[in-house]
Image (cartoon, rainbow, N blue to C red):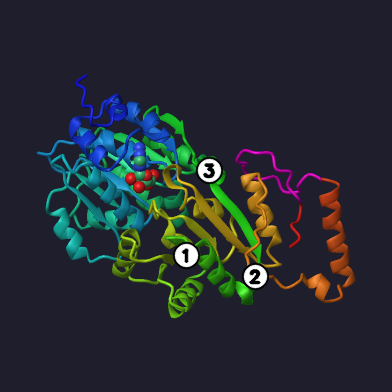
Amino acid sequence: MQKHPELPQAFADLGIEVRFLKALQRMEFSKPSDIQAGMIPPAMEGKDILGQARTGTGKTAAFGLPILQKLDPSKRLQALCLAPTRELAVQVAAELDRLSQFANLHIVSVYGGQKVATQLHNLGRKPQFVVGTPGRVMDFIRRRALDISQLKFVVLDEVDRMLDIGFRDDIKMILSHVRSDHQTIFVSATVEDEIRRLAMRYMNDPVELNVSRDKMTVDEVDQSYVTVDPGDKFRLLKLILEQEDPPFAIVFCNTKAAARKLARKLFDVGINAKEIHGDLMQRQRDRVMESFRKHRIRVLVATDLAARGIDVSSVTHIVNYDIPVDPEVYVHRIGRTARMGAKGVAITMVNRDEGNALTSIEMLINREVPQRQVAGFRPRPPAEKRETKTPVEQSAARSSQDSTTQGEPPKKTPRKTLGGAFPVRRKRRL
Ligand code: AMP
C-alpha cells in the first residue's frame, strides 16, 4: 500500500482511498472511531450490516466512507439513506458532502418542510446519493421524481427513532421499491425485536455490530442535579450560565411552549439564546441550527424531537430545564455533549415531585447522579419541613426511608443498565 505520511494512515489501513483520506485529513479525523473500525471492513466487503450505534459515535462516516468510495460518479442514483428527522437528514448529507469533497459526487437531501420545487430541482441534478426522511422520499417516489429501483446501497439511520415516529409503513414501502441487488445497512441506537425482524426480512445474513455509546456517554459526562421549585428555575438557570460560563449549551424543555417562553426570557436578559422546536418552520429551524453550528448562538433552547441528531461537537453543557419523563431520553439528551471523547457537563433541574423520574434515570444508567450546589442558590426547604404532613404522607415518607436504609432491591427492574454498580434506591427524596 502506498504511504502518504500526511494522510490518516489508520483509515488508509482500512482500505480508504486517497481522495477520501484527503477529506478526512481536512476534517481532522486522525483515527477511526470504534464504529468506523468495526463497520468499514464488512461494509467494504459488501456485507449487510445491523449496527447498534448512536449519533455522535462517527456512524455517518462508518457507513458513508465505504459507500461513497464505491459510487460511480458517472452514473445516476446509487445510494439512499433514510433518516428520521429533517435535522438528521441535513446533517448526514452535510457530513457525506464533506467526506466527498475531493470526489466528484453529488449528494442531495430531501425532507418535509422545505419547498418540493427546490428539492425537485436538486434531484434533477442527478445525485448519486440521496438522504431523506421517509415521508418525503415516499412523496417523490409517488411523483416519479425519484426512482430507487436500481439502488446499490440502502441505509436506514436511527431506525429505532424512525419506527417511534411512525415511519414503519413508509419504510417498508420504500424498501419494497428497490428491485436491484443491493447492500443494506441499518444503524440504530437500540436494536429491539421489531428492528431485528425488519433486518431479517430485508437483509441477507447481516453482520451485527454493537458499539452503543450509552456507557461512554454516561461515563464521560459530569452529571448532577439541582433541586428547585418550578418558579425558581429561571433564576437557577441564569446562575448556572453565569457560573459555568459555557461557550455553547443546549437547554432542554419538555414542551414547545416552554421552550419558546424560556428562549424569550433568556433573550430578554441579554443571553444569546434561540429556540428550536417542531412549531418552527423548517427554514427557521435550519437557520437556527446553522447559527448554532457557526457559534452565533450561545444557548439553544430545544425540545427533544427537534434536538434529535443535533450534532454540534462544541456543545459543552446540557441543562435539563425539565427532567425528561422517559429516562432513555435523558441518555439521548446528555449524548448531545461529550462528542467524540470531549468532556461534557449535564445539569438536571428536579422539583420535589420528580424524585421518581430521577430514580428511573439512575436505574437506567446504573449510577447515582449527585446533587450539585450552585453558589448563590438556596432551594427552599423541603415541603415536609415547611408544613405538617398528613398521615398518608408520613407513612409514604417512612416506607421510602425504610427501603433506603434496608437496601431493598428496586421494585422495578431497569430495562437495561449501563455499567457501574449503583445500589438503586426505591424512591428519591428531594
Ligand atoms: P456522527 O456520529 O456520524 O454524527 O459523528 C459525530 C461527530 O464526530 C461528527 O461531527 C463527525 O464529523 C465527528 N467524527 C466522526 N468520526 C470522527 C473521527 N474518526 N475523528 C474525529 N471526529 C470524527
Residue hosting label 1: 303
User: Residue 35: x percent and y percent?
Assistant: 41, 35
> Image quarter for residue 68?
top left
> Mark 2 is on which residue type?
Phe
Is residue 172 visible in the rendered image? The answer is: no
Indicate which disc, 3 or 2, sits on the residue closer to the N terminus. 3
In this view, the residue in front, 133 or 170, is 133
Query: What amino acid does circle 3 point to?
Result: Asp
Predominant secondary structure, magenta span:
loop
Residue that badge 3 annotates: 214
Q: Is residue 183 left or right of residue 361?
A: left
Q: CA distance from mark 2 to mark 1?
A: 26 Å
Assess whether residue 417 is covered by the magenta stretch: yes
Q: Quote the CA–CA distance across marks 3 and 1.
A: 20 Å
Q: Are marks 3 and 2 in contact (CB under 8 Å)?
A: no
Start-end of magenta stretch: 408-425
What SS does tag 2 mark? Answer: loop
For discs 2 and 1, the disc positioned in front in the rendered view:
2
Cα–Cα span, label 3 and label 2? 31 Å
Residue in the image at 20% along x and 59% along y: 119
Residue 91 among those drawn in magenta: no
Ranked by sequence position, the earlier of labels 2 and 1 is: 1
**Front position in the image: 110 or 244:** 244
At a point 30% along the width and 45% down the height, the residue shown is: 81
At mark 3, the secondary structure is: helix
